[in-house]
Amino acid sequence: LNTSRETYLERQQRALAAAASLKLDALLVSSLPNIRYLTGFTGDNALLLLEPFQNILFTDPRFLFQAQQESACRVRSVRRPLLRDAAAWIHRRKLRRVGIEQHHLTYAQFRQLDGSLPDAVELLPTERLVESLRTIKSPDEIALIRQSALLTCQALEQTLPLLRPGVSESDIAAELVYRMRKLGADGPAFDPIVAFGRNSALPHARPGANQLKRKDIILIDCGAFHHGYASDLTRVFFCGTPPTAVRNLHKAVVEAQKAALDAARPGVRASRVDQAARRVLRQYGLAQAFLHATGHGLGLEIHEFPRLGASERSRLEPGMAVTIEPGVYLQESGGIRIEDTVVIRENGCDVLTPASKELVII
Ligand code: ZN
Ligand code: ZN
């Protein structure tokens, strides 16, 4: 499942075409996930200059061999700051209108670049040019996300037997990461959220020394990176026999999640998927307890476009990979969230995280 050199060259061509439509002579890419998407390079320090004459990856000697092996473009390894070297290259090539990634260049970096260039060169901010190419996944990328999602489900399943009264949130978080790595993941896509009892009411709870007690809700949100691609999964369990109130909350969230899954198909605005989940929760009187958007795109990063939120006007398209994750959070009783990773298909969406949504009793 290695991405072919042709695929990277084709992505570079598409990014260049997008830059040309903005009348840019070149595009300086500084986001590492964007550089990975366009070239295959997975190192920590790089800049990529896309221009019609030649695409060049700038890196430092620590990454030279890796860059030569991985990157589908010419590589320059330099000891001086990469921005300065890129500026010298831009100058030598007489490029005039150079696009920069405004969300991925700090002000200090911008000043360094600008200060190293002659006045004739214009630096023009671009708005998520490569990110929009990344929004639609190729069949190969979807296959990688699917593998990542299966791996995450397996890691969770292998960790469940360890949920016993007395175990701590940190223990379970550590086990999840360990299982992911043993199953072949690059690593976790984010620090797993493991929340017991009232901590589950915090949508982004940090696992700590808190120990599992009888009558605790158990919320686990985790995901792996596999060959660079992320997956994201949330399930809820209960220690003991759940009271009716918790069963009802769980039922409401499962129903809201199903409504959102049913709404997720091509041509539909992302906000409609969010509305579908919110409508169900409103019927249960839980609208106020839903504290975040219904989902987010994912791929080389855990949060990508589109966002499935109330104000997101963009429309879903086949090949988008997104999460569907409504949740309710009540300070007294705790929180419930159900999250799947899905891919938008011609006629709806495919769920890539097959883990059961039953309220499992531990
Ligand atoms: Zn998640
Ligand atoms: Zn998520």
Image: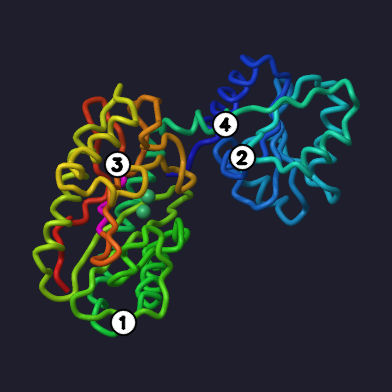
Q: Position of residue 20 (x, y in %)?
A: 65, 16
Mark 4 vs 1, N-terminal side: 4
Reading the image, the residue beneath label 4 is 128
Q: Nearer the viewer, mark 3 or mark 4?
A: 4
Does the stretch in magenta take in 100? no
Mark 3 vs 4, N-terminal side: 4
Q: Amino acid at mark 1?
A: Val
Label annotation for residue 342:
3
Is 360 left, or right, of 312 in this rendering? Answer: left
In this rendered view, identify the residue nearer to me: 181 or 232: 232
Mark 3 vs 2, N-terminal side: 2
Stretch in magenta: 336-342
Contact, CB < 8 Å: mark 3 with mark 4?
A: no
Residue at image point 37% right, 62% down: 202
Secondary structure mostly taken by the magenta-highlighted segment of the chain? strand
Q: Amino acid at mark 2?
A: Ile
What distance separates the C-alpha of mark 4 from that of mark 1?
Answer: 43 Å
